[in-house]
Amino acid sequence: MSLVRVAVGACRCPNAPHGDGDWVDLRPAPTIDIGAAVYAAVQQWSDDPIQLQVSWTRAYLRYGVAAWSFVDADGPVLIRPMSDGYEDLVNRLLPFDQGGFEVADRCDDLYAEVVLRPLLTRLSLMRSQGGQTDGSTSPTPDTSPSLPTPSEPSSPDDMGGKPSEDQDR
């Protein structure tokens, strides 16, 4: 599978070596590390949807970034997701308004459904069995979409249009 390139704006590197702008390449599918980090976030933050989303995004950026065009005074900036300063590095190189949003959003498109599908399937099975499985310590929040509420008719019953021919039969 090919990496997924996300353009992140004009080159911010010293001496602007990238005339066509900076970019970030993402893994095209979630890795075990992404899945494990997202599951850990669900266990830790299931009662706080905002912190849960923050944790998911951090997992995506830590383990989903495969390459980028960033250069500093010493040369190409290496991607070292397990280093202590990696999160600060990503925040410096990818501010929200300078490509950070686009990269995080693309990561969510690439990874969220695939990573969460097994978790939602497990939750569905637990509910159909009438409770938690052995070893569970807390319920997982219901993140499945709710059905939309039917809208009211746009005109009163006495002002409605003519029924279709199929309805008369």
Image (cartoon, rainbow, N blue to C red):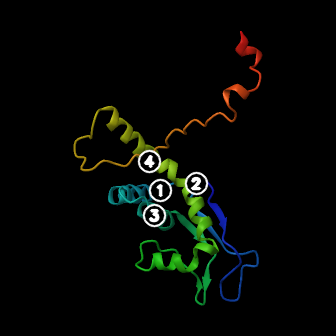
Q: Name the residue under label 3.
A: 59
Q: What's under tag 2, amino acid-wise? A: Asp
How dense is the environment of label 2, judged by Cα within 10 Å: few (below 14), some, or many (20 and up)? few
**Nearer the observer, disc 2 or disc 4?**
4
SS at circle 2:
helix
Q: Which residue is drawn at 40% across and 78% down?
A: 84
* Residue at which label 2 appears: 109
Q: Is mark 4 on a helix, strand or loop?
A: loop
Residue 48 appears at what percent x and percent y? 38, 60
On-image quarter of the C terminus: top right
On screen, 90 above or below 145? below
Sequence order check, earlier mark of 2 and 4:
2
Above or below for 60 versus 117: below
Give how far across and how far down residue 39 sits, in percent.
38, 55
Observer-nearest of 91 and 22: 91
Is label 4 in contact with label 3 (beta carbons under 8 Å)? Answer: no
In this rendering, which labeled residue sits more in front, label 1 or label 2?
A: 2
Kind of residue at disc 1: Thr
Q: Mark 4 points at which residue?
A: 143
- Per the rendering, the mark at residue 31 is 1
Residue 29 visible in the picture: no
Task: Estimate the spatial distance between the alpha carbons at disc 4 and disc 3, rounded to whole Å.
Answer: 19 Å
Q: Nearer the viewer, residue 46 or 136?
A: 46
Disc 2 from disc 4: Cα separation: 16 Å
Q: Which residue is drawn at 59% across and 70% down?
A: 100
- In the picture as drawn, the residue positioned furthest to the top comes out as 169
Dot 4 crowding, Cα within 10 Å, few <14, some 14–19, many 20+: few
Asked whether disc 1 touches disc 2, contact meaning CB atoms under 8 Å apart, the reply is: no
Q: Is residue 68 visible in this depiction of the protein?
A: yes
Task: Give me the C-alpha separation between circle 1 and circle 4.
Answer: 22 Å
